[in-house]
Amino acid sequence: MRKRAAARQTDVLSVLQSCDRPMTAYQILERLQASEPDIAPPTVYRTLSALTEQGRAHRLESLKAFVPCRCNHAESVPVLAICDDCGSVEEHDGSDLLPKLTALTAQNAFRAERHIVEIHGHCVSCAS
């Protein structure tokens, strides 16, 4: 029996929330296959797409991986600080950046549909 989209989203979010590092779609797939051997990659990709559109997960473009959303970004910009050593991701609320980003892109009549800022560096544990 096929799962409904909401149940599938809950499953994928649970996997993402159980890991303290970003996960690729195939890593998520492997975890889900432990209990559902027949689940296929397109199912995971469709679910991740829906979760990112809803703002419940973020795709880290630079890593081609996903993390669960840990903030409310209705009128904000998620700022994700990614440690290049240990892979940890801290999520920050970039509300004050939204007007600046909008003004910057408006100069060229570009209309952004979503905002996400990725910053790579080293967390406090790895920097010492």
Image (cartoon, rainbow, N blue to C red):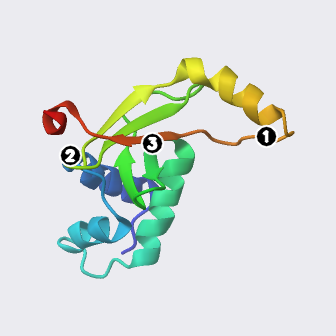
Kind of residue at disc 2: Asp
Q: Label 1 to label 3, Cα distance in Å?
A: 22 Å
User: Residue at coordinates 55% horizontally, 30% vertically from top-left?
Assistant: 77
Numbered circle sitting on residue 56: 3
Q: Which mark is residue 5?
A: none
Number of on-image labels: 3
Query: What secondary structure is marked by label 2?
Result: loop
**Earlier residue among tags 2 and 3:** 2
Dots 1, 3 in contact, CB < 8 A:
no
What residue sits 57% from the left and 48% below the top?
53
The span from disc 2 to disc 1 (Cα, nearest Å) is: 33 Å
The amino acid sitting under disc 1 is: Arg
109 with respect to 25 (left or right):
right
Q: Using residue 90 as the reference point, say whether residue 79 is left or right of it.
A: right
On residue 20, the disc is 2
- Residue at position x 18%, y 35% from top? 127
